[in-house]
């Protein structure tokens, strides 16, 4: 297996290069199960994000990262947009987002009424692991707007491909999309 090494502000990570069905390869970044990496990235990002009243992420890889950032910012709760509608979400928000680079198909994001109330009228920072095409980010921006919040920041561990050129996001480092 091939690997791509990236420096995440002092933490060296070896990411496996994985081929997607469309013929491109990505440097696969996964925080699941990596407590040391998640703690490091969360603490570094918490120092970079603008002042905010609330955080939001999409399940699943942004969950533990957002947990660390919320703890670092002394925020007892954060909002979670789910990719499947749970029983407690019947009165919440539901939006459709474009396919992301890894899913390759249209998805839904659901936000419970409780989480919508958490961000209503608040300055909100969106947190996730990787930004690539921006499809997931657009969905999160839309759901924050529908809930009545204002996005004041967008924080990611990594910017993939052309996302590194975006001026509206904060990230620790960038990774390539590999076409060979």
Image (tube, rainbow, N blue to C red):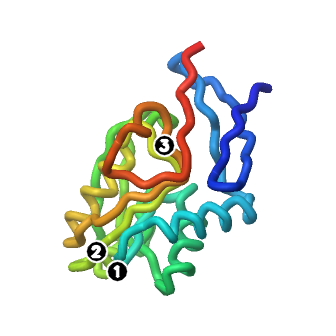
Compared to residue 147, the image places residue 138 above or below, namely above
Q: In this rendered view, identify the residue nearer to me: 106 or 142.
A: 142
Which numbered tag is attached to residue 159?
3
Q: Quadrant of the N terminus?
A: top right
Q: Secondary structure at mark 3?
A: strand
Disc 1 to disc 2: CB gap under 8 Å: yes
Earlier residue among tags 1 and 3: 1
Mark 1 vs mark 2, CA separation in Å: 5 Å
Q: Could you say where residue 110 lies in the image, as x and y percent from the top left?
A: 36, 61
The residue at which mark 1 appears reads as 53
Q: Secondary structure at mark 2?
A: strand
The residue at which mark 2 appears reads as 123
Picture residue at 53% right of the left edge, 59% below the top: 62
Q: Could you say where residue 25 lies in the image, as x and y percent from the top left?
A: 59, 24
Earlier residue among tags 1 and 2: 1
Mark 3 vs mark 2, CA separation in Å: 23 Å
Q: Could you say where residue 81 lies in the image, as x and y percent from the top left?
A: 41, 63
Earlier residue among tags 3 and 2: 2
Q: Rate crowding at label 1 as few (under 14), some (14 to 19) or many (20 or more) other CA atoms within 10 Å.
A: some
Disc 3 to disc 2: CB gap under 8 Å: no
* Residue 117, image quadrant: bottom left
Q: Could you say where residue 60 lies in the image, as x and y percent from the top left?
A: 55, 57
């Amino acid at each position: 297996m091939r690997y791509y090494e990236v420096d995440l502000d002092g933490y060296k990570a070896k990411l496996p290069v994985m081929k997607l069905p469309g013929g491109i390869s990505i440097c696969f970044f996964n925080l699941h199960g990596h407590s040391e990496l998640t703690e490091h990235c969360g603490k570094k990002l918490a120092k970079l994000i603008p002042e905010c009243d609330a955080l939001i992420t999409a399940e699943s890889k942004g969950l533990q990262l957002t947990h660390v950032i919320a703890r670092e910012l002394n925020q007892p709760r954060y909002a979670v947009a789910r990719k499947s509608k749970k029983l407690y979400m019947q009165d919440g928000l539901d939006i459709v987002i474009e396919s992301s680079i890894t899913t390759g198909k249209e998805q839904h994001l659901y936000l419970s009424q409780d989480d919508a109330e958490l961000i209503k009228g608040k300055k909100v920072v969106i947190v996730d692991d990787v930004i690539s095409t921006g499809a997931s980010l657009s969905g999160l921006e839309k759901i924050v707007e529908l809930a009545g919040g204002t996005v004041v920041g967008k924080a990611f561990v990594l910017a993939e491909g052309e996302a590194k050129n975006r001026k509206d996001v904060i990230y620790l480092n960038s990774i390539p999309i590999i076409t060979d």
